[in-house]
Amino acid sequence: MEEFEQIIGYTFHDKQLLQEALSHSSYANEKKKLRHSNERLEFLGDSVLSIVVSQYLFKHFTHLPEGELTKIRASLVCEKSLHVFAQKIRLGDAILLGKGEENTGGRTRPSILADAFEAVIAAIFLDGGLEAATPYVLGFIPEDIDSRRTAAFSDYKTVLQEIVQQNPEEKVEYMLVKQTGPDHNKAFVVNVCLNSNVIGSGTGRSKKEAEQMAAKEALALMGYEA
C-alpha cells in the first residue's frame, strides 16, 4: 500500500479508501463481509474523471465546438486509455484479486485495470477532495491532445449519441439484460434502446464493452458505417 502511494504521489489519510479501491469484486467475495469491492468507487470515479477532463478541455480548447470536445474526452476516458494509464502506475501489481481472477490473468485484464483506475480516482477524491483528484487525473493527460487522437479509438456510444441528439425528443438508454459466468470470466449482454425500443444488442467481458458493442450494432442497423 505504501509503495503504491509513492508511485501515485498521494498519501491517503484514510487507508481504508485505498484498500477498497484496490479490492476487486472477486477478492471481496472471497473475504465475504470483511471487504467491500471497488465497484461503488468505480461509479463515483467515472464521474470525477469526466468532470476533471471536461473542465480541462473546456478551458484549453476554446476554439473547438462541443462535438469535437466530446470526441476528445471520449478518447481520454475510454477503457483503452484507462488501461494504459493503469499500466503507468503498475496498478496490476497492487490490485487485490480472488484466486480465480489471479489464476486467469486478471492483473493484466484491461477491464479490471480500467475500473480500478477509476476507483482510485474516487478514493483520492473522497480523501482529499477535488483539489487532490484534479492534479492526479491531469497528470495522465498527454500534452499532444488534438481532435485527431480520436481516430485511434472506437467510441460507438459517442457517435450514436451525437446522431440521436439531432432530434432532442429522442432518448438513448443502455440496459443490462444478462450477466453470466464466474467472477473471473463474466459475460455481459446489454441492449441499447431508443425511446424504449431496442435498436441494438452487444456482448462483452465488461458492461462498458457490451455497451460499445450494442451501440456498434445499432449504428450498423441505422445504416452508419461502424
Image: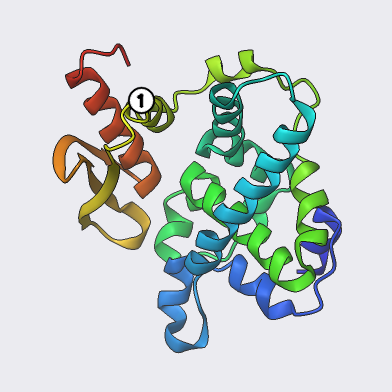
Quarter of the image containing the C terminus?
top left
Residue 90: x percent and y percent?
Answer: 70, 48
The residue positioned 38% from the left and 27% from the top of the image is 156
Answer above or below: position of 203 versus 33.
above
Residue 114: x percent and y percent?
Answer: 55, 47
Residue 203: x percent and y percent?
Answer: 25, 40
Q: Nearer the viewer, residue 38 or 102?
A: 38
Q: Is residue 223 visible?
A: yes
The residue positioned 54% from the left and 45% from the top of the image is 108
Q: Nearer the viewer, residue 64 or 134?
A: 64
Q: List the residue tagged with mark 1.
A: 166
Q: Secondary structure at mark 1?
A: loop
Answer above or below: position of 18 versus 111.
below
Q: Is residue 141 left or right of residue 226?
A: right
Q: Nearer the viewer, residue 30 or 111?
A: 111
Task: Give amino acid for label 1.
Answer: Gln
The residue positioned 67% from the left and 80% from the top of the image is 16
Residue 132: x percent and y percent?
Answer: 81, 60
Q: Residue furthest left?
A: 197
Q: Is residue 107 visible?
A: no
Q: Is residue 207 left or right of residue 101?
A: left
Q: Quadrant of residue 3?
A: bottom right
The residue positioned 21% from the left and 41% from the top of the image is 193
Quarter of the image containing the N terminus?
bottom right
